Structure formats: C-alpha cells, structure tokens
Image: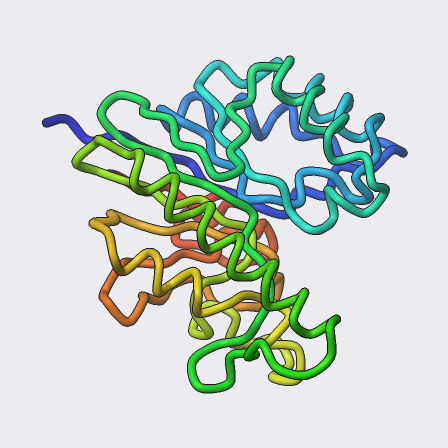
Amino acid sequence: MSKLKVAAVADLHVKEDRSVSYTELFSEISQAADVLVIAGDLTDLGKPMEAELLAADLKSCTVPVVAVLGNHDHQCDAAEEVSSILVKAGVHLLNGQTIEIEGVGFAGTKGFIGGFGRHMLGSFGETAIKAMVSESVEEAMRLENALRNTRAQRALVVLHYSPIAETVAGEPKEIYPFLGSSRLAETIDRFRVSAVVHGHAHKGTYEGQTPGGAPVFNVAAHIEKPTGRPYAILEL
C-alpha cells in the first residue's frame, strides 16, 4: 500500500486587504504533497470577500483540498456563504462528514471549547454553561458520525480546536479551556485513527498524542514544524 503525503496547515487568516497571498505556498504544496488539509481559520473575520480571495489563491493548488471551518470563519455570521464559496472552489469542506482520497479517510469537524481531563467543563449551573457544554458534545458527536462512516483502513481526523492539552502547551494556561476539549479525544480513541491535525493554538506545541495513543499535530501556520515551512507533511 503506497503512502499518501498530506500537507497540513491551519490559521491562514486570509484578510480582505489581501496583505498576504498564498498562491506561491499552494503551488509549492502541490509539488510536495498529494493532498492539502487546512484545519480551520481559513479567513480572518469570516467575510465572504475573504473566502473569495482564498478561493482565488487556491487556483494555484493542483491537489485535492480538504478543510474545516474555524472560529474566525464564524465571526461575521456568514459561515454558510463562506462555505458555499469554498465548496464552489473545489474545497472538500467537512462538518461531520468524511471523504476518502486514495485509500485515506478524512473525517472532520470544527470542534469546540470545554477544557481537558479532569478540568473539563461539566453541564451544571446556568443555562449558558449548559448550552456551551451541549455545543461541545454536539461537535464530538459530529466527529463520531464522521468516523463511523469512514471505511478506509487509514484515517486522518481534521479539527480546528485541539483534542488534547499537550499541543496547546505554550499558550497561557488560563485560556486552555477555550482552546479545545477532551471530548474530542474520547471520541477519537474509540476508533482506529492514523493521525489528528488541528490549529487554533498559535503559540502551542507541534506534536502530542491522545490518551489512546493517536498522534496529534498542531499545524497552525505559526507553529515551528520539522519541514521548516508553515505546513507539516504527514505520510499516511
């Protein structure tokens, strides 16, 4: 079975002022990998124009593109329009779905906050807290549905929020609960998963693993990676 080379990056934060173009980076990735994965925060403020600019840059990418939305992509309450623009540009945008490419299943969702381990937020108290925990549980269920529908022997989980504390280390501990949730890791560890990628924690740590041993990679563009480039290369 031949290995699939996946280039993974997150937190591109494409801005309306077009201060950064990713055309050359996407062209480079097309030569280095078989698939490009973007793990959320594709846009800076979730504006349709930002999505249009990203779609234009992606014309230089000649390999399949798989992505999930991040929190920034929801900022202007235009996530549906942003999604539509990206899907029309050929992006396989996952929100609880899976897609198989050359024998590898890509299962993805945004994820949500909630904290890690024994510090994970419980559904108790005010309605607002219960709603927050409910959203976190719902995202974990979306991921579970995606993984249940993955028939491939090799599976890559694509998230924006982290499933573990290890790859957010470097961020202030006070904001750990807002960087991810162990509920995602609990779901991942019920399935055979080759690797997990996420973003969101710009000052986090590149590599860790779930309690069940699944490799986890923080691929935010700001994180130093073995490639020396904004993207990581994973061979699955």
Q: Nearer the viewer, residue 89 or 57?
A: 89
In the picture as drawn, the residue positioned furthest to the right comes out as 17
Q: Is residue 5 left or right of residue 133?
A: left
Say if 162 sits above or below 39 in the image.
Answer: below
Q: Nearer the viewer, residue 21 or 81?
A: 81
Say if 6 sits above or below 131 in the image.
Answer: above
Say if 218 sits above or below 173 in the image.
Answer: above
Scheme of colours in the image: rainbow
Q: Is residue 30 left or right of residue 74?
A: left
In the picture as drawn, the residue positioned furthest to the left comes out as 1
Q: Is residue 107 left or right of residue 192?
A: right
**Residue 139: image x %, image y %?**
52, 52
- Quarter of the rendering containing residue 202: bottom right
Image point (70%, 26%), residue name: 54
Image point (35%, 24%), residue name: 34
Quadrant in the picture for the C terminus: top left
- Quarter of the rendering containing residue 233: top left
**Residue 147: image x %, image y %?**
32, 42
**Count the marks: how many?**
0
Say if 171 sits above or below 68 in the image.
Answer: below
**Residue 148: image x %, image y %?**
29, 40
Q: Nearer the viewer, residue 222 or 67?
A: 67
Quadrant in the picture for the N terminus: top left
Q: Nearer the viewer, residue 199 or 114?
A: 114
Image point (50%, 67%), residue name: 181
Q: Is residue 44 left or right of residue 17?
A: left
**Residue 100: image x %, image y %?**
32, 25
